[in-house]
Amino acid sequence: MTTALTPGHHRADIAVIGGSGFYSFFGEDAESIQIDTPYGSTSGPITIGDVAGRPVAFLPRHGVAHEYAPHTLPYRANMWALRTIGVQRVFAPCAVGSLVPELGPGTVVVPDQLVDRTNGRIQTYFDNGGIHVEFADPYCRDLRDAALQDGVVDGGTMVVVEGPRFSTRAESQWFARQGWTLVNMTGHPEAVLARELELCYTPIALVTDLDAGIEAGQGVRAVDVFAEFQKNIEPLKALVRGAIGAALMGPCESCRVHDGIALPIELP
């Protein structure tokens, strides 16, 4: 059942933004709520349930029926809505292509750097007021530590492309020559909007394919990406649940970027 938000009633301090396969993250006792924001509606209802003894919010990144393409996602509405219900920390499991052969399909990586190669996406809440957030290290150190469980690769640079098409071989090879290791379509502006809202945020990246320039032969196909993600979805869910249980409670001082700054808008 989906209900309208009652302020102060539905609360969660930690959230998961996930794609296909995470839509059944909770059991039957979870409750879904719909939140309208100054930036429109979210990509789908937010479901709140219990994970590791904590109330956790889940937001379907691409919509319940996967109706949103990466370049059309309501990123600002999604992040704003999560903060509205009290979320302070966000895990963002996602599918990625690998730019290096040693990170093959099925590998899980917690990146530590981001490169934005998107275009035209609105990537800020601050259209005036001279607000410039610190973003040298785009992902929360505490959340990264919580996600770094056995078998998970620590570190890497995720380049985010506009999509919805996959990269050409030349683009893929160029990305790899820069030393970047993963390619994705949704990690920006999610990360920077989280930082502007002082939300701790980290992706948990599941490699679904070797990008087009890494291997000769056939390029990346969406059907293969979805199949690889589904093949690994249950272990990935278990990893995310473990990360939630390991995540620290309370605010993270390193992600508080507005101390001493007068903001032109009031954050929820």
Image: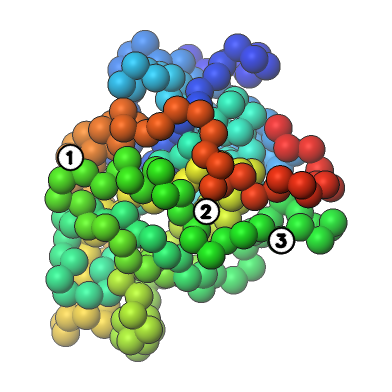
Q: Nearer the viewer, residue 226 or 54?
A: 54
Q: Residue at x 46, y 54 (%)?
A: 139
The Cα atoms of the two marked residues, 2 and 3, are separated by: 14 Å
Q: Earlier in the sequence, mark 1 or mark 2?
A: 2
User: Within 10 Å of the Cα at label 2, are there few (<14), some (14-19), or many (20+) other Cα atoms?
Assistant: many
Do the residues under discs 2 and 3 have CB atoms within 8 angstroms?
no
Q: Nearer the viewer, residue 176 or 54?
A: 54
**Circle 3: residue type:** His
Residue 186 position, x and y percent, is 46, 57
- SS class, disc 3: loop
The relative height of residue 74 versus residue 172 in the rendered view (above or below) is: above
Q: Nearer the viewer, residue 201 or 85?
A: 201
Residue pointed to by mark 3: 132
Residue pointed to by mark 1: 235
Q: Nearer the viewer, mark 1 or mark 2?
A: 2
Q: Which mark is residue 82?
A: none
The relative height of residue 247 versus residue 103 in the rendered view (above or below) is: above
- SS class, disc 1: helix
Q: Which mark is residue 191?
A: 2
**Circle 1: residue type:** Pro
Residue 220 seen in the figure: no
Q: Residue at x 57, y 61 (%)?
A: 135
Do the residues under discs 1 and 3 have CB atoms within 8 angstroms?
no
- SS class, disc 2: helix
Residue 181 position, x and y percent, is 30, 71
**Circle 2: residue type:** Ala
Q: Earlier in the sequence, mark 1 or mark 3?
A: 3
The relative height of residue 206 versus residue 181 in the rendered view (above or below) is: above
Residue 87 position, x and y percent, is 54, 30
Q: For residue 83, what is the image quadrant?
A: top right
Q: Residue at x 45, y 33 (%)?
A: 15
